Image (spheres, rainbow, N blue to C red):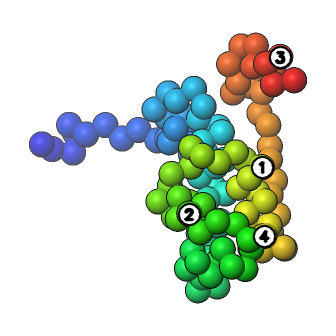
Amino acid sequence: MSESDIELVHGSGNVFRDFGDPLADLKQAKAVLAARIIAVLDNRGLDVHKAASLTGIAAADFSRIRTADLGHFTLDRLIEMLAALDSNARVTVKVDLSRSAPGAASRCG
């Protein structure tokens, strides 16, 4: 295989979208929040049991986040968990309707 046989494709910045996932933006948002939660745990040297005792949130929830098992979580739950760990955390959401499927705005509202 030579370099001329390789096609370089630039991603969108959202791997879920790049693979055509219909819930790409939601999954990306969850992944970003989970990564921030993991960063806070790591920076503070907290294992899941210490995090649970500090926040009152089940250790199993922190374990799920560490293993990227995010299907059990809503965005608001992940935001609550981040806020419980870091009261100075900021979450900004930008909605780009140009990327939404036709009719998506009416389904959301």
Could you tell me how far apart the alpha carbons at marks 2 and 3 are, in whole angstroms?
36 Å
Whichever of callouts 2 and 4 sits on the residue coming sooner in the sequence is 2
Q: Residue at x 54, y 34 (%)?
A: 17
Q: Residues within 10 Å of mark 3 (few under 14, many from 20)?
A: few
Q: Earlier in the sequence, mark 4 or mark 1?
A: 1
Where's the C terminus, which quadrant? top right
Mark number, residue 76: 1
Q: Residue 96: x and y, percent? A: 77, 33
From the image, tell me which residue sits under label 2: 60
From the image, tell me which residue sits under label 4.
Answer: 84
- The answer to the question of whether label 2 and label 4 lie on touching residues, with beta carbons closer than 8 A, is no
In space, the residues marked 3 and 4 are separated at their CA atoms by 33 Å
Kind of residue at disc 3:
Ser
Helix, strand, or loop for circle 2? Answer: helix
- Left or right, 19 with reference to 78: left
CA gap, disc 2 and disc 1: 18 Å
Callout in the foreground (3, 1) = 1
- Closest to the observer, 89 or 81: 81
Q: Nearer the viewer, mark 2 or mark 4?
A: 2
Give me the C-alpha separation between circle 3 and circle 1. Answer: 21 Å
Above or below, 25 relative to 83: above
Residue 49 in the image, given as x and y percentages of width and height: 58, 78
Q: Earlier in the sequence, mark 3 or mark 1?
A: 1
